[in-house]
Amino acid sequence: MRKRTINIIIIMYVILFTVTAISYVGARNKTLHVGVDGYCAPFSITNSHGELSGYNIDVIKAIARTLEYKIEFRIIPFTALEKDLKRRIVDVVIAPMDSGNEKNISPDIIYTNPYYFNNLTLLKKNDKDIPYTEKGFGIGTKICLPNKPYILDYVRAHFAGTIIKIYNGSKYAVDAIYKNECDVVIDTKSSNEYYRTKHRLNKMEIKPVYNAVEYNHIYKIAMTANKKYLKEKINKAIEHLIQTGELNRIHEKWFSSKYQDNKIQR
């Protein structure tokens, strides 16, 4: 009888150990290692304490909560994100990289459904009448630009007769129009909406730039091709965030516009 009792106790300990081990492994497997740049406002921002914030950070956190995953962030230089993803240093990368253009897509990487749509826009004061048509601006219109080469190339190619002023970043270009140093700011929608929201510039309006379809960008979450199961899970999570309105709430927090409206405009 005593021997039987000891055997039962041993079996129970074995079962308990096995269940604990499985739970531990399961918990480890449900940790998502996420690669971000950390210095691409408004998508990922790192403060002086090394803490991350931004639209992408909120989106991936919401996805992780939906999937009941833990997150460990890895701050990686933007140019090394894809390389470190392929080296399996991270499970996924969420960054403002255009995955809607086939030229930018690597055969070793797969992408989820879109979580953000970007395009070129102009920012102007509501009470300032700036003539703008598909043919461009009037002669002498002052345009403020951030130091983004592709935007400068576009403006030079499409807006002859304008005065171009270049600033060291989107923030300074927005500051310039607020100080009446120029008539409009041409920048990505994400930057214009973010700085208008951040500084509560309610008297500013944002409009799309005509004939700039080639600058429309689609942002998706990237992972290696062997993680199709993870792609399916994240896609379901993104759909859940859309249906519950959570993605709209995150979008409004950073851009004062809704994800769904942003999608329709595309």
Image: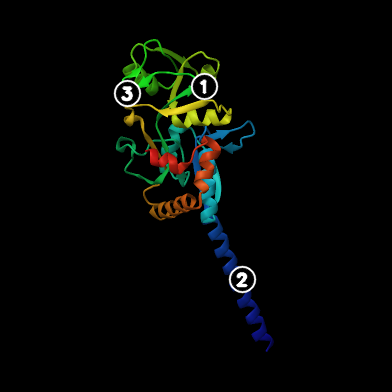
Q: Is residue 182 above or below residue 46?
A: above
**Residue hosting label 1:** 174
Say which amino acid is labelled 2: Leu
x and y percentages locating residue 173 in the rendered image? 50, 19
Q: Is residue 17 visible?
A: yes
**Residue hosting label 2:** 16
Observer-nearest residue: 61 or 178? 178
**Residue hosting label 3:** 134
> How crowded is the residue under tag 1: few (<14 C-alpha within 10 Å), some, or many (20+)?
many
Q: Is residue 146 visible?
A: no
The quadrant of the picture occupied by the N terminus is: bottom right
Helix, strand, or loop for circle 3? loop
Helix, strand, or loop for circle 1? helix
Say which amino acid is labelled 3: Glu
x and y percentages locating residue 126 in the rendered image? 50, 23
Give the CA distance from mark 1 to mark 2: 61 Å
Pointer 3 or 1: first along the chain? 3
> How crowded is the residue under tag 2: few (<14 C-alpha within 10 Å), some, or many (20+)?
few
The quadrant of the picture occupied by the C terminus is: top left
Residue sitting at the far right:
2
**Left or right for 13, reference 168:** right
Identity of the residue drawn at 39% across and 38% down: 265
**Left or right for 199, reference 104:** right
Q: Is residue 69 above or below residue 11?
A: above
